[in-house]
Every structure is written in structure tokens, then in C-alpha cells.
Image (cartoon, coloured by chain):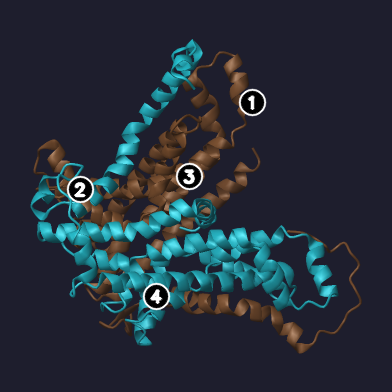
Chain colours: A cyan, B brown
Amino acid sequence: MTAESRRKLTRSQRRRALKNFGNFLLNIPLLLIILVPLVYTVSISLVNPDEVYKTLLFPHSIQFGNYINAFTNPSYSFLRYIINSFVVSTSVMLCQMVTASMAAFAFVFLRFRGRRILFLAVLATMMVPGEATIIANYLTVARWGWTNSLHVLIVPYMTSAMGIFLLRQSYMTFPGELKEASMIDGCSNWRFLIQIAVPLSRPALGALGAYVFLNTWNQYMWPLLTTDSDAYRTVQVGISMLYDIDAQSMGLMMAGVVIVIIPSLSIFVFMNKQLINGLMAGAVKG
Amino acid sequence: MVKNTKRPRPMKIKKTPYEIIEPYLFLLPALAVFAVFLYYPFGRTIYLSTWVTDALGRPKKFVGLDNYTIRLFGKDAFWTSLVSTLEFVGVVALGGLIIGMITSLLTYNRYKGSDFCAAVYAMPVAIASAAASMAFRMIYHPTGGLLNNLFGTQINFLGGVYQFWSVAAVTIWLQSGINFIFISAGLKGVPTELYESCSIDGANYWQKLFHITLPSISPTLFFQIIINIINAFQSFSQVKLLTNESPNSSTNLIVYAIWHDAFRAQRFETAAARSVILFLIILVITLIQFSFEKRSVNY
């Protein structure tokens, strides 16, 4: 568009531009409410310690000391926490994909005694909030001597009713002939699951994966109860151990928060569709 | 579910023993995890709530319902905690719904920047409550936090009468994303013909909002408020981290009280009893939701 033609915007175009701008302006208060806490956190993590308590929104000075400190400080093994959280979240995610695919397969494609009752048993787990069983679960794993390990963070979350439902829904959209035809061709149930059902349910698996990884990464209460050594601590517990004694630790704390939020936001940005589909399926449970 | 019972059944072929157990093999991993970490602890929690336990959570003496009647219902602290939890849940459920409603309406029409706004409004779903609580601790800081710097004050937002509202505000902030996502999806499902015919009749924005939009999405709003209630009941990290493990009576929410009973007071029996109460509350809410959903199909 040349400058000449730009000047000749018609009245309606100008009005539309104005309306567009007005529409956007209405969003500003709420945009600020959501974004300012995050921007402020980044600012505090970057500012010099003597300016922490004076910073309004943007930092006057920038230094990366807190980030270097978060990774190199011997008394605060942030790198360890990140590795732990990655191992735990990835394991939980993969386990849920496997167990949920298998269970959903049985419920959709196989006929067996007790199918209805077992399905109700899975359905019923959605009614129980995790916090209501957390004490008994803690006592179980403590009796087994499982506390302070990575498997204590993984094993209890290896399956979920939400995952089973999500995949069941996906399998139910398969045409009925698919299973019959493959059975006639002599395809075993295991092979059908691995070579046909799993590839065809990729969107549902993606939704489950994004949702479960994020939820596990963000988990706080269970890791808090079951781990109290640096070797097995996860990120959310790790960042919340620091206390705001002075400006120095405030900066370190905020750097930790930023580092921990980056993977969460990456999933939100790069797997947005899958995450939202997972959330929609998962919201049925509390 | 697809019904294929109409077809004549094939001649009975005897299944091999493996074919009989195969379906259960597919279910085994999931059901084993549920059995050990869901059904068993569920029963165990009810069981423990009728005993007095030692500091390691082992049952020592059967006391029937004493943990409920004497150690909880008989204490004022329990009722204060319950009432605070209900107040908190009410504030968070409504606050989340209102923010979700406003953000959804603001991004309903497409314009330059509307996609950006929608992404920002949905973003809190990805952020952990622990991480957000730590960030808000700095924002609420009594001497040099963002809020006090902005207002030029020295208010202790994390103590006294402010504590309840500070914790509730963070929880609403965290819940605003899921509220936006669901309500926004509900709004997009309202048939546009309804708005068009209304515009022809000369209705203005607010008339359309109150006579078409709100009634049309009322099932969504109802569903969303149930989700908000259930989520708010489960708030824990924001209470523990924002109040520095010392909530006052207005912020001593039920999950925090469960944790405190078990891990600070070593009273696993009252923790178990409180867990059962939490379960019953969530159960009632879920049943209300089910019965309404069944009814709303008929309208």
C-alpha cells in the first residue's frame, strides 16, 4: 500500500480501525492483571539485589546472577530438581499412555464377564478427590520405605480414569469393520492395539500427554509429602523451599519461578490444542 | 455405545483359556494402580478415621465416630475452618466465573489483537499454583512488594484481614484460565441466528447479553461453577506458601487442615476424618451436578 492510498482510507475503514482499537483497549485492565505478575517476576529475577524492593514493573538494571546462582549454588541443586521433574513427568506421561490405551482397548473392543462393573469401577475413581486419599497413600508408601525415591512420585500416577475415557472416546469413533477385518486377517488383539489403535488415536494421546506432563510438572502436594532430600526433590517443591529472608534470596526465588514456568508455558504455547483438549476432558474430575 | 446385538449370534466357539483371561490382562495395569492407590487408601482412610493412631499413623485404639463427633464437630476450630472453606470456595467460584465471563465476552468478536488476548486469558491454566504462589509472595511483600510500591503503603497483605482476600485473589487468578476456556467455548456454541433475529428487532448489546447469551450458556456456566467449587475445595499450595504455614482462622482451608493434622500435629486420625468429610462434600456437589445435567437435557 502506498502512502498516497493509505491517506485515502474510507470513512468506514477508519471507523473500523477505531472500533478495533476500542475493542482492544477494553482488554487492557484484564491483560494487565494476568500479565503483570509474570512480568514483575521476571523483573525481580533480573534486577540487582539492592533494587529488589524498589522495582515497580521493569528493572532499572539487569544482571543474570540469580540464574547462574540457581544452577551453580551447591546448597540449592536446581538442576537436580529440573532433571527429577523431567524424569518423573515423562515417566508418568508414558505410563498413562500405555495403561490407558490398554484399558480403553479392552472396554471398547473386547467382550468379557464383568465389563460393565469394571467400567463403573473406573468411573467411580473420578468421584474421589486426590486430597482425600493422600494421607492413606502417604502411610502406604512410608510403610514400604518408598519415600525419597523417584518411583514414589511415578507409580501412584501411572494411570488415570481421565486417560481411559479420553482414549475410549477416540476408539469408539473407529468404524466397526476395522476390528472385524483385522480379526479375519488373523491380527491378534495386541497387534491391533499397537499397530492400528495407537496410531489412529494419536490426537487423543497427544491431548493426554500434554495434560499429564503439565499436571505432573506442576504437582506440589504429593512430592512435598514423600520427598525431603535434594536428590529426589521436584521443581515445585524446590522453588518453594526458599524463604524471603532478604533481597538476595528473593531474586533467586523469582529466578527459580521463571525457570519452572518456562516448560509449563512452552507446553501451553507449542501444544496448545492438545493441552486444551486434555483440559476439557480432565475438568470433569476435580 | 454401538449396539450390535441385532445380529444373530455366531455359533458358540469355545474360547481358549488365554482368550478368556486376555481382556483382564489389558485391564490389569490400570486396575492394579487403582486398587493400590485409590480403592485401598479410600477404604483405609475411612477405617483410620474410626481409630486413634500413633505418630506413624498406625491404628492403636478403636473409637468409633469419636474422631468426628468429639475431635472435630465438638471443636469450634473445625466449624471455623469449614465456614472459612465455604466462604473461600464461594468467593473463588464466583470470582473465577465473572472473570471468565468478561474475558470470554471481550474476545467473542474477532479483531486485531483478539487472538493475543485470548491466549493471555487462557494462560493461567498452565501455571502451577506453587510457582504462582511464590511469585505473588513477592507482589504482596509487606515492605517492598509491587502492590505496596504502587500504592505507596506498607500493608501486610499476607496477614490479618487481608490474608483471606490475598489467597482468594491468587486462586481466582489461577482459575481464570480454565473459566475463560470453557465459557468461551460455550459462547461460540450459541447459534448466531439468535443474535441476528434479535438485532433485526432492534435489541442493543446488553439486551442481547441478558436475553440470549446468558440463558443460552447457562448450562456451561453451571458446569463451570461446579468445576470452580471442586477446584477451590482442593486449594493447598497457595494457603501453605502464601501464609508461610501459619494461616489465620479465615484461611485455614480443609486440605491445609488435613495436611496440618497429619504432618504437623501427627494426628492422622483427624486428618483421615477430615478427608472423609472432604470426600462427602465433593460427592454431594458431583451428585447435584449429575442431577442437574440429567434435567437440563429435557428442556
Q: What residue does disc 4 label?
A: A153
Q: Quadrant of residue A193?
A: bottom right
Q: Which of the two residues, B166 or A92, is positioned nearer the viewer here?
A: A92
Earlier sequence position, callout 2 versus callout 1? 2
Q: Which of the two residues, B151 or A90, is positioned nearer the viewer here?
A: A90
> In 3D space, how far apart are the residues under numbered discs 2 and 1 (Cα atoms)?
46 Å
Q: Secondary structure at mark 1?
A: helix
| Residue neighbourhood size for the residue with mark 1, other residues' Cα within 10 Å, grouped as few (<14), some (14–19), many (≥20) | few
Q: What residue does disc 3 label?
A: B181
Q: What residue does disc 1 label?
A: B193
Name which residue type carries label 4: Leu
| Image spot of residue A256 (x, y percent) | 25, 61
Name which residue type carries label 2: Ile
Q: Secondary structure at mark 2?
A: helix
Q: What residue does disc 2 label?
A: B139
Q: Residue at x 44, y 51 (%)?
A: A269
Q: Are marks 4 and 2 on the same chain?
A: no
